[in-house]
Amino acid sequence: MPQITLPDGSLRQLPDHATGYDLAASISEGLARNALAVNVNGEVRDLTRALPDGASVSILTWNDPLGKATYWHSSAHLMAEALEVMYPGVKLAIGPAIENGFYYDVDLGEGRSISSNDFPEIEKKMLELAKAKSQYIRREVPKAEAIAYFTEKQDPYKLELLENLEDGQITFYTQGNFTDLCRGPHIPDTGTIKAAKLMNVAGAFWRGDEKNKQLTRLYGITFPKAKELAEYLERLEEAKRRDHRKLGKELKLFAFSERVGAGLPLWLPKGTALRERLEQFLRKAQIKAGYLPVVTPHIGAKELYVTSGHYEKYGADSFQPIRTPNPGEEFFLKPMNCPHHCEIYKTEPRSYRDLPVRYAEFGTVYRYEQSGELHGLTRVRGFTQDDAHIFCRPDQVKEEFKKVIDLVQYVLKALDFQDYTAQISLRDPDNKTKYIGSDENWALAEAAIQEAAAEKQLTTVTEYGEAAFYGPKLDFMVRDAIGRRWQLGTIQVDYNLPERFELEYTAADNSKQRPVMIHRAPFGSLERFVAVLIEHCGGNFPLWLTPEQFIVLPISDKYVEYAHEVKARLEAEDLRGTIDGRDERIGRKIRDGEMAKTPYLLVVGEKEAQDGIVSVRKHGEGDLGSMPIADFIKSVQSQLL
RNA sequence: GCCGUUUUAGCUCAGUGGUAGAGCACUUCCUUGGUAAGGAAGAGGUCAUGGGUUCAAAUCCCAUAAAUGGCUCCA
């Protein structure tokens, strides 16, 4: 009689050999119907497997991320089954679940390809197969048998995967006429897959290595209800409407020119207004937090990057050196600001009493990203980091980290990013040799980061092996208004550059000590941050940030003079906006103002001019009626606080 | 960098072997108007660039560039 523990802590006795399904059925009929898999002591398993005595068990449904992942993984098998029917001889590589749906990498063989025109047929076949309610049957298979099966099937990819598996660990899953090498787990049967959509076809390298053969990767997604698919597609449409590349053009924020060069954004007046406001905002917060603004040149001598180590690592794959009339003299566009800031640190001898020093710079840097990497403003070749470097004693790392966390949270809050977690990236504990710096310092810094995050009550995820070779880091993973995740504020500890630049301070005992360097960028880069912000707010920027807060719309040219009066009154109160003095009807001016997402449209005509009032229309809310100019100013200012 | 797709007027796009189109934007004129597009006329294009095939190329082929969906990468 196995006894298991449920998530609420309660105990339950089950008959011998009871399965996850039996457990679900013993709780409620509905749960049994909706159960997809079962979580046994943290391991997701098939519902059909017997539960071990004493286990902690939770039933996974569509509402659990792990339940969804199982569902989508099973859907990948279903798609593979459909592909085998429609493209006989297709070779299958791997087919995992991903954040939204699943993919399967397949080798169609010479001369065959799949395009989006083929998707509807594949979807149809998937749903047809799903209707059969085929069970996913798990079977443990001896290695020799597995090899024999895939040799017979002539599938080189599965055979390669099998090489790395040990006998006794190999399982097959079969549904309908399709059998796949798979660790599982899977949902009970295909009957719950009611809606299927292939999203995309792309090339992908076998095992992610660009030296390997390129396979066809088919992305798909499935749902238990057709309605959920429709909602998902609607969310994608919304993401398209918010795309910063589209809005950036429509709102005249930035542009690209082939003649200027790929990945080199041109900031238009409105985009510049937005960006400069963001800069001012952060500059002010940083000065309050004890940062010292510095400015450094856009280029640096080759020697600077030989010292920093970047020349060796990136020199050949980056923008090539700038030469001068002096033979042998070479300068590089700066790919980061740290080396310059190290040299600023070195301009005077430092005492332990002077630390920490915090140098901040909105530094424009250039990196030759591979042509295929460029993407709107999120991945460019010239961008401005909201960079700063904190030079501190090892015992100050935690305190400085906490202060940076405060600053990042202040920034995120001001821009209405509510939902975020912190990802802490530490050393791979099994492979410490690939990191620079002493064990002692690493332990200190890793502990400092974890404690700082805990004391700031951040929700954290810890990733081992994700640290940079020169130090551990913490990144803010931010969820935007439509649920997408972005990596925004980043804080990194660095032991490498202080070493390479031989940075020192004099300790209390008069010994020379090496400071720790902390890199941090709350925005990351202005370019990327503006892109994320555009998509987060769909182009409706916060009032304090928006390039144009109001447009005054005179009903006819008789009231243009009064419009200027209104504008002057508002500008005197530090509000910013323009006048639409075109020879157009008011309906047209309102439409254009709304399309530009201007927060306030101020209609002025005969009544307004006579009484010294404005008729206010707010974006998204419509006509608010008329009010004295002073009242309007007050109401706007109350929102800016 | 790799695989696929795309590139036609300022913007969004139609045109698929027989010498280029629409809507919006722009210019001019009419209109002086009250909360999401007033009317008319006009101007604007080496069809990304360079080769090739053809009597004839925006259209077919090749190369290059840029954009784009992925992959790989991201100091």
Image: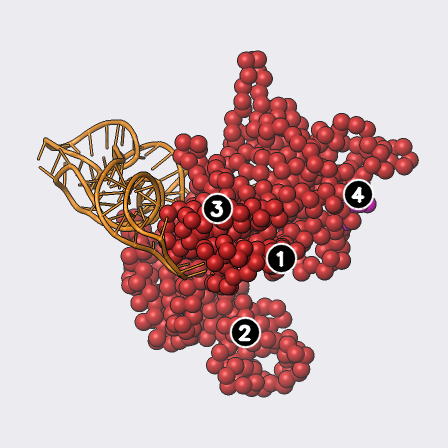
Chain colours: A red, B orange
| Amino acid tagged 2 | Leu
Tell me the distance, in whole angstroms, between the alpha carbons under discs 1 and 4: 49 Å
**Does label 3 lie on the same chain as label 1?**
yes
- Residue A395 part of the magenta segment: yes
- The quadrant in which residue A274 appears is top right
**Residue for badge 3:** A561
Q: Mark 1 points at which residue?
A: A634
**Above/below status of A543 relative to B2:** below
The C terminus of chain A: image quadrant: bottom right
Q: Are marks 2 and 3 on the same chain?
A: yes
User: Horizontal placement of A531 versus A489: left or right?
Assistant: left
Instruction: State the mark number for residue A294.
Output: none
Q: Are marks 4 and 3 on the same chain?
A: yes
Q: Which chain carries label 4?
A: A
Residues in magenta, as a range: A393-398
**Which chain does tag 2 point to?**
A
Q: Which of B65 and A359 is in front in this view?
A: A359
**Disc 2 marks which residue?**
A60
Q: Of label 2 and label 3, which has the lower sequence position?
A: 2
Q: Which amino acid does label 1 sit on?
A: Lys
State yes or no: discs 4 and 3 in contact (Cβ < 8 Å).
no
Q: Report, in whole angstroms, how far the alpha carbon at label 2 lies from the one at label 1.
A: 53 Å
Secondary structure of the residue carrying tag 2 is: strand
The CA span between labels 2 and 4 is: 45 Å
What distance separates the C-alpha of mark 2 from that of mark 3?
Answer: 68 Å
Near mark 3 (Cα within 10 A), the count class, few <14, some 14-19 or many ≥20, is few
Nearer to us of marks 1 and 4 is 1
Foreground pick, A524 / A330: A524
